[in-house]
Image: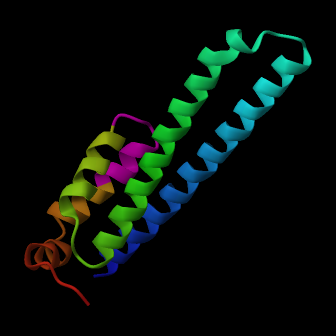
Amino acid sequence: MNHLNNLKLVNYVLGALNLLVALLTILGGIATVGMGVASGADIGSMVPSIVMFGVFTFSIGIVAVLFFMAGGRVARAKGRVLQTILAVLSLPSCPGIFYGAYALWVCWMNAESKALLDQGYID
């Protein structure tokens, strides 16, 4: 169960980092709009930027929630499908390949973790 706990911790850290990025994006959006208003720009011309910041922030927030959900479920030896989806989606990025490879190994190849996930073990 040690690898499942490690994977839980990694999921929580990645969720927290995604929340931090979302918060920084919100602050960047507020600063951008504030600077636009201060420079006398028309608010109508800033609508596409505001929408872009909103969609980007919402997307990052959803990913953060998914990481937290996966971490909680993996800790109880459940949530293999959600964890696998997050791992596969992380594979194309440079740091994400390490997370993805480790998560897939824990869920599908490590004998102890695989046995617990197969039976849906809850502590």
Front in this rendered view, residue 98 or 20: 20
**In x, y percent, where is residue 70?**
33, 63
**Quarter-of-image position of residue 28:** top right
At 47% across and 52% down in the image, what residue appears? 64
Magenta extent: 92-101
Q: From what the image shows, is residue 43 above or below residue 77?
A: above
The outermost residue toward the bottom is: 123
Q: From what the image shows, is residue 123 above or below residue 74?
A: below
**In x, y percent, where is residue 1?**
28, 82
Front in this rendered view, residue 111 or 37: 37
| Residue 64 shown in magenta | no
Q: From what the image shows, is residue 111 above or below residue 24?
A: below
**In x, y percent, where is residue 115?**
11, 77
Quadrant placement of the C terminus: bottom left
Describe residue 12's horizontal placement relative to residue 41 as left or right. Answer: left
Most common SS among magenta residues: helix
Describe residue 1's horizontal placement relative to residue 114 as left or right. Answer: right
At 55% across and 38% down in the image, what residue appears? 57
**In x, y percent, where is residue 35?**
85, 22
At 15% across and 79% down in the image, what residue appears? 116
| Residue 94 shown in magenta | yes
**Quarter-of-image position of residue 105:** bottom left
Display coloring: rainbow
**Quarter-of-image position of residue 110:** bottom left
Front in this rendered view, residue 39 or 70: 39
At 64% across and 17% down in the image, what residue appears? 47
Exactly how many numbered labels are in the figure?
Answer: 0
Describe residue 84's horizontal placement relative to residue 68 as left or right. Answer: left
Describe residue 94's horizontal placement relative to residue 47 as left or right. Answer: left
